[in-house]
Image: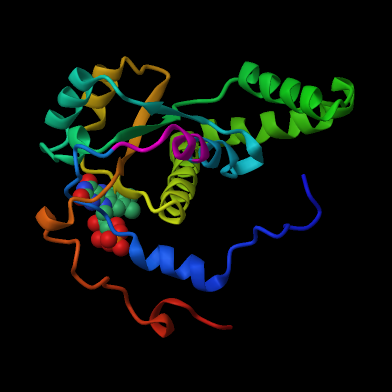
Amino acid sequence: MQAELGKEKISGEAILESLNWRYATKNYDKTRKISAADWAVIEQALLLAPSSYGLQPYKFLVVSDPDVREKLRTAAWNQPQLTDASHLVVFAYKKTQTEADIARFIDRIAEVRGQARESLADYENLLNGSVKKAIDGGYIEVWNSRQAYIALGFLLETAAHLGIDATPMEGFDAAQFNQILGLTDYSAVAVAALGYRDAANDWLANLKKVRFPAEQLIEKI
Ligand SMILES: Cc1cc2nc3c(=O)[nH]c(=O)nc-3n(C[C@H](O)[C@H](O)[C@H](O)COP(=O)(O)O)c2cc1C
């Protein structure tokens, strides 16, 4: 990790240009595929997303099989992005967390940072306490699913900077998705289709972005 961001820092202007350019694409150009190099960046963005305590209680399913994508489309109100976009990612959160999951995470910290595992015992207890509270309080699924949305946000912004179109999607039947994808310990919560817009056939491509004015959303206290 660098102490300071190096010469590749993106200008504010470039960031806003990307964010204004992106839109929730409805129709993709089926003939255009995302390059392996760009896709690798998007996968890294998913891995680099922050999560509560760093627990990463989710999985990202990159679905390439056309038959599976066809089935998913039928469980997503027949939205064409499911089959026509270059890439499809299903965000699935973990339905619960066990002490074994926490232990695995602590092992990973010890490994990556070269720390003695014993030195992390207090932290492990703290995490187990937080997770137990969430399970007992009935909000572990809400908590874990929220973490997946942060990764979705990272993916959307990264794609925009790469000039790749993306659609965040919640319009699908999660139970059917779980069944099609064989998910049991995890549950699908969001989808992202990615590729290149078919601007000529997308009613939304040239419409203005609709947002409330800043003063209605950003309160300065
Ligand atoms: C969580 C979430 C779920 C969404 N679900 C769908 C969806 O199922 N299908 C779709 O075409 N767009 C979907 N959208 C896109 C939104 O309608 C879109 O982001 C919003 O209207 C703002 O427009 P923009 O993204 O083009 O700036 C979803 C967006 C989010 C953030």
Q: Image quarter for residue 145?
A: top left
**How many marks do you count on the picture?**
0
Where in the image, quadrant-wise, is ligand 1 located?
bottom left
Position above or below: 63 against 208: above
Q: Is residue 52 above or below residue 177?
A: below
Splitting the image into 4 quarters, where does residue 76 fall? top left
In reply to whether residue 39 is colored magenta, the answer given is yes
Q: Quadrant of the N terminus?
A: top right
Q: Position of residue 109 (x, y in %)?
A: 76, 28
- Magenta stretch, main secondary structure class: helix
42 on left or right of 87: right
Name the quadrant of the C terminus.
bottom right
x, y (%) of residue 36? 44, 32
Pinpoint residue 209: horizontal percent, then vertical percent.
27, 71
Q: Is residue 182 left or right of residue 38?
A: left
Residue plotted at (50% across, 68% down): 14
Q: Nearer the viewer, residue 130 or 174?
A: 174
- At horizontal 46% and vertical 55% (from top left) the residue drawn is 161
Residue in the foreground of this view, choosing between 214 and 81: 81
Q: Is residue 34 left or right of residue 103?
A: left
Magenta highlight on residue 34: yes
Closer-to-camera residue (94/34): 34
Q: How is the image coloured?
A: rainbow
Whether residue 105 sits left or right of residue 162 in the image: it is right
Q: Magenta region: which residues?
A: 33-41
- Rendering coords of residue 101 (x, y %): 61, 20
Q: What residue appears at the point 39 percent right and 26 percent down from the top-left corner?
A: 61
